[in-house]
Image (cartoon, helix red, strand yellow):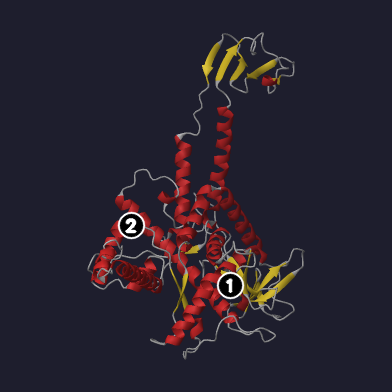
Amino acid sequence: MSDPILYGPQGFPISSKFLKSAENGSRRLPPEAIRAHDPLKKLITSRDWQTVSFLADKIDMNFGVSEGILSQKAMFAVTDGWAPVFMGGEQGDTKVREWADIVTDWLVNQWFPFCDVRGEIFDFNTGLYLDSIETDARGESITIQTRSEDGDGQWPMLQAISCRRIGQWGCETKVSDGDYDGADIENGVIKNRAGRPIAFRILGENRGDFKDIDAAHVIRTFEPRRVDQSRGLPLFSAVLDSWRSMAQSHEWEEQTMLIASAIGLLEYNETGDAGDGFSLDDPLNADSLPTNSGTPEFKSLYGGLIRYFKANSGSKLEQFLHQRPGSDWESFNDRGIRVCCVAGNWPYSLVWKKDGTNGTATRADQNIARKSISDRQSLLRYPAIRKVRYAVSVAMQHGPNGEPAILPPYPGKDRGGFLKWDFSMPPLMTIDEGRDRDNDREDAKFGWLTDEMKALRMGTTAAKLAATRDREALGLINRAQKIADETGKDFSLVLNLLRQTNPNGAAGTPASADTPPPIE
């Protein structure tokens, strides 16, 4: 015997009374239109996406809490890090190491400061910072690979554009002409049959103008949230109405407080004016408002310090008391900010109130922030690697007229080894740096923390640390030799005396591996 069919209040069959959400409609909630088989591109139209992206961007530009979340996440994820680290070549291959040193120096000192078409203000790290901001604020970050227009065009460059420039003027679902004729197009993304983007349609200033750019030249960054998603959504899409309500409420309460701050005293009298000394011609009373009869109903004196009101009987002088915004308003907005912080995967205590927190709660918030930062770094890593790969590949090519390449050819035997790059990450966010360093020293004693791992956690590389130690050791030896020659003293004695003041070791003992040297 088959199971009996159960029906909801609206007459629609459901699988079980246990699954309350399956009921379409109830006495408490209105019925919902079910579109279970429609893909996301039908549920979220191009117009809806543009609206959400614009409103989220506007809120972030005008509401300090949301802007703080975006800026803090980007700052901790990008600042003081992202030094290029070459990962290719065979162990002990000196030619590859020399080539990697040359390319690393070119990347850091020449290309990173001048990689953007807008100039040196938008250097490589600033570009990553803006990629994070754009991903959260507008939904996507778009960067186009290009070359310099002046000279021989050998200099690789990056051009960042607003994600809202990718779209389509009409509602077509197929490309009708050009190199991608017959391909699917969805909100400016041209895709193959598997749904993979093969090109992007960039809109011009005038309606009807556009240009399709191959996806191989476009670096796009966004946080995927659905399997059938083709465009990124802003971070606060789920709580956009809450942000807008809080921002509007804050603006109105601020207006009320400004009005209240202009009033110091209230005087109620029979005439509703300031007496014999009051004159409408006095510039101090220029904001007085007369009634239709010509008799002032209330008047302000001394720039709003005192307000006069007409009383039916009796006279009195009161201090103006303002009791807004109240505790209910504060609690409501605090709750809204907490919900928005949860949606943004960022601790409430880092952008708003820290009242009532203890050490355990603070460490829990720190772990949430660290996970969020790590997630953002993993999102930015591959686009950053693509940028470096593009720069190195172009710089290794000869010019169109036979000009020499900017970088020497790759000497390694591993195929595609010149593309194997990674980055050092910024130092981890911490609330107790001394305690974390103690833990690192203990881990290093047991071999759980290598020099490379320690360097990456500090926001640098093991090669930089080794080079710093070598320079300091060489400088110490040269100083000791100079003093020994000038004084005739024993070189070892002078060296030991100098090492007593050396931050990397004590007299007569080698430099401690647990104590990090100064970082250049």
Q: Quadrant of the C terminus?
A: bottom left
Q: Is residue 464 visible?
A: yes
Spatial CA distance of label 2 from label 1 is 36 Å
Instruction: Label 1: state its secondary structure.
Output: strand
> Residue at 61% across / 23% down in the picture?
304
x, y percent for residue 453: 35, 71
Q: Nearest the camera: 285 or 151?
A: 151
In the picture, the disc for residue 219 is 1
- Name the residue: 47% across, 42% down: 332
- Foreground of the two, 190 or 7: 190
Q: Which residue is mark 2?
A: 433
Give the residue type that dot 2 points to.
Glu
What amino acid type is highlighted by mark number 1?
A: Ile
Taking the image as shown, residue 115 lies to the left or right of residue 152, namely left
* Circle 2 crowding by C-alpha within 10 Å: few under 14, some 14–19, many from 20: few
Q: Left or right? Give the position of 349 relative to 197.
A: left
